[in-house]
Image (cartoon, rainbow, N blue to C red):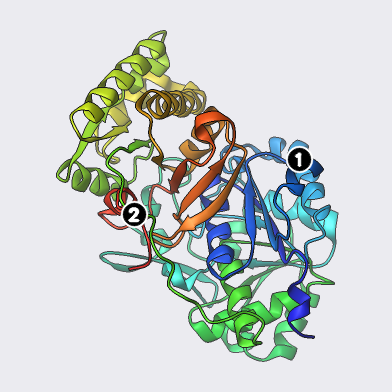
Amino acid sequence: MDGQALDGPVLAWLGDDFTGAAAVMEVLAFAGLPVALFLRVPDAARLAQFPGLRGIGIASMARTRAPEWMDAELPALYDALIATGAALVQYKVCSTLDSAPHVGSIGRAMQIGQARFGGAVPVVVAAPQMRRYQSFGHLFAGTDAGVFRLDRHPVMARHPVTPMHEADVVRHLSAQTDMALSCLDLEALHDPARADAALVAGQGVTVDMMTPADEIAVGRLLWENRSAHRFVAGSQGVAYALVAYFRAQGWLPAAQPVGGLGAVARMAVVSGSVSPTTADQIAWACGNGFAGIAFDVLAACGGGLADAEAAAVQAGLAALDAGQVPLIYTARGPDDPVVADLRAAAGADLPAVNDRMGAALGRVLRALIERGGLSRAVVSGGDTSGHVCAALGIDALTALAPTIPGAAICRAHGPGAMDGLHLALKGGQMGSRDYFGWVRDGGGAR
């Protein structure tokens, strides 16, 4: 085998949210592989406008959906990925394993995939380059305060929809599927014969990964077993592992720093995240030339949503006229009183209210882009990103410049003023404290 193995599509993936789907794209793109992420299933004519792709992604909002939605929708989405001819097909999940039996069930997505593809399903959640580690079956994630086991993580243990109470990946996923699951641990990973045998013996196999050497070993496991085990579930750690293996084989050149795009004076940010990480980023931004604008979230529970949108747009335009970057947010962290107020007001209708808020933020951002003549924007929140991209009407993204791993600045492809927009999509729990400023300044490797 030689580098000619990379002549066709290497990986096709379905993201369970928009930010995660974009994270896979950036790993491959900044490694030198032509790649595009589509925000709806592309037809042959649309694909033909992106020739020579080695990575093809489709973004979805599966993380917010019930298992019944997955039963109805995932088979056709998997078929679309199969049709690309990619060597490997991935169901992309969050590197912090966001999921539960009733919403965003990774186990159900795996089960549907195994029925379609056959073979065992490798599960690669760890992504060491993002400080996500799996050791002897347990998942850990890093923060500014250190590395925490996931069930003790200061953000993920308090996630508003899928709080993490179990760090053992097999135990967590076993509550979501009746597949037989096991762990390929660090001791066995570096013995190719034992590692390959672990795939043959199971239905779903979670894979430890801690170090650069582990990445290469995981990449070998996936690539050399791709014929029998074509379907994989995991985070962008899958892409990192494949790139590490390809480089070790001499099929890809060593990583080169990717430059930035240059600063812009006019930009807008919308945030639907309640993460403490995002709260810190909002606080930094408000002290560094951004205008914090609270969106009236309670309006999504009644009939005042149109007025709330209009008020946010007017405040955003006024901020632009004053030389500031408007930052329109729904909450400043989980302890913002508006979070409890919204839950009380929405009650059992909270998922639908969240959908309405996400769509409203999308309409606000679109108005600011069109009326303010903006060429760059940021969306904070994985679920929010899906709603906003739909409101903007864009249908594809390509990576332009890195920031923190998993939240690059992308080029939007779509109609009118949206085509060519610089757009950064950031998961709520991700990013440096100055992330919004980094995007304003054009990103680029630090």
Crowding at mark 1 (Cα within 10 Å: few <14, some 14-19, many 20+):
some
For numbered disc 1, what is the local secondary structure? helix
Left or right of residue 49, residue 416 in this image: left
The residue at the point 60 percent across, 82 percent down is 247
Q: Where residue 154 appears, x then y in whole percent?
A: 32, 56
Separation of residues labelled 2 and 1 (CA atoms): 45 Å
Considering the image in quadrants, where does the N terminus appear?
bottom right
User: Can you say which quadrant of the picture contains the C terminus?
Assistant: bottom left
Q: Looking at the image, can residue 287 be seen?
A: yes
**Looking at the image, which residue is at 38% across and 62% down?**
444
Q: Nearer the viewer, residue 198 or 386?
A: 386
Relative to 440, does residue 355 appear above or below in the rendering? Answer: above
The answer to whether residue 248 is left or right of residue 44 is left
- Mark 1 = which residue? 71
Q: Position of residue 171 (x, y in %)?
A: 58, 62
Q: Work out whether mark 2 precedes mark 1 in sequence or the reverse, and give the earlier one.
A: 1
Q: Of all residues shown, which one is farthest toward the top? A: 303
Q: For numbered disc 2, what is the local secondary structure? A: loop
Picture layout, residue 145 above or below residue 329: below
Residue drawn where x is 58% and y is 69% of the image: 32
Give the amino acid at mark 1. Asp
> 70 or 163, which lies in front?
70
Q: Is residue 161 left or right of residue 266?
A: right
**Measuring 75% from the left and 38% from the top, which residue is drawn there?**
73
Name the kind of residue labelled 2 in the image: Gly
Indicate the position of residue 141 as horizontal and vertical percent values. 41, 65
Image location (x, y in percent) of residue 335: 25, 39
Q: How many marks?
A: 2
Q: Which residue in the protein does label 2 denote?
A: 262
Give the vertical position of 428 relative to 168 (above or below).
above
